[in-house]
Amino acid sequence: MSQEHSVSRRSRDPAVARWVARTLAADPPRAKSLLVTVWGDALAPHGGAVWLAALIRLLAPFGINDRLVRTSVFRLVRDGWLAASSHGRHSRYRLTRDGERRFDDAYRRIYHRPPEEWHGLWELVAAAGVPATRRAMLRDELAWTGFGELASGVFVRPHEPARPLPAIVAAPGIAGRVVVAQAGDLPGQPPLAAAAGRAWDLTVLAAEYRQFLHRFGAVIERFRAGEAHDPEQCFVVRTLLVHAYRRVLLRDPLLPAALLPLDWPGAAAHTLCRDFYRLTHRLAETHLAATLAGDGESLPPANAEFRARFGGL
């Protein structure tokens, strides 16, 4: 047994192992969704390319077998996220340009908090002229970028100067049928902020954030207590944490504090993720590098955006 492997086995935390087993049993992740998390969180910062065999090894600790990995990768290729290349009997996958854009859009929201300052302006999209067959697609895409439905066919979000409108408003069959405007509160009319509860279901979202904090708040203490941790455990728990956080966050409109309840748990969830990253990212990267080395490949250096996550690692 190598010295490195011996140290890793001695530092494996039985309590963390039990937590991982309970978490996977209680809420087993779907293979394709977990693969998206691993790619966006771990692989994209290092160039976004990997051998299929290494990917299978990375997902094995989560109970995802090689057949499910192959099926999930095939679906991501079919959906335009990944491109494949063959080298003899071995396959290598990389992010497409469209896949890179999708990952950038989603993961920017995870690792960077939106501006706290808000000047009271709103963006409105009125879609009364959009055919019903396209309105559901429009609603889903607008929700992805923080819009809530204020009334039938009327969507609203707090205005941020640097945040572009989603591309769907210019799509065929929609462009020219929507009205986009910026507005403040009208004199003599109820403030738009009073309608936040109608436009966004903050009660359900808050409950999901609290469940997230309850589940991951206990395990993070195991990593705060001392320095000797197992690299694979760091990678597995960090991946499960980002996976769970992503599922909640991507439905969060990230409203300014002025529009949120006083006990809003979203900021605490972000802080927990930030603290966990700072505790584990070096050893998680060690596990990633060791796993890819099984194919004789060295891990490319992480890009600058990785080092800037959560305000700087």
Image (cartoon, grey):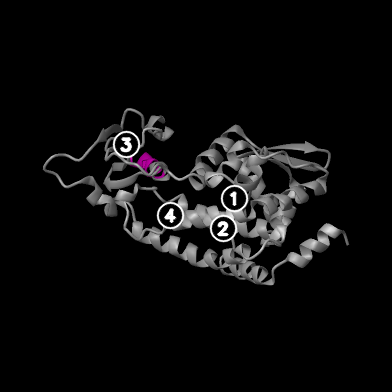
Q: Please give the residue where the numbered disc 1 appears in the rendered image.
A: 37
Give the residue type that dot 3 points to.
Answer: Val
Q: Of circles 1 and 4, which is in front?
A: 4
Task: Specify whether 297 is left or right of 265.
Answer: right
Residue segment shown in magenta: 130-140
Q: Is residue 41 left or right of residue 13?
A: left
Whole-percent x, y for residue 96 in the image: 62, 35
Which residue reaches farthest top? 176
Judge by depth and name the residue closer to the eye, 184 or 51.
184
The kind of residue on which mark 2 rests is Leu
Instruction: Say which mark, if any, is on residue 241.
Output: 2
Q: Residue at x 39, y 60 (%)?
A: 206
| Lower position in the chain sequence, tag 3 or tag 4 | 3
The numbered mark, 4 or 2, whose residue comes first in the sequence reads: 2
Residue 79 visible: no
Amino acid tagged 4:
Ala
Q: Which mark is residue 267?
A: 4
Q: Which residue is mark 3?
A: 130
Q: Secondary structure at mark 1?
A: helix
Q: Is residue 179 above or below residue 272?
A: above
Image spot of residue 299 (x, y percent): 74, 42
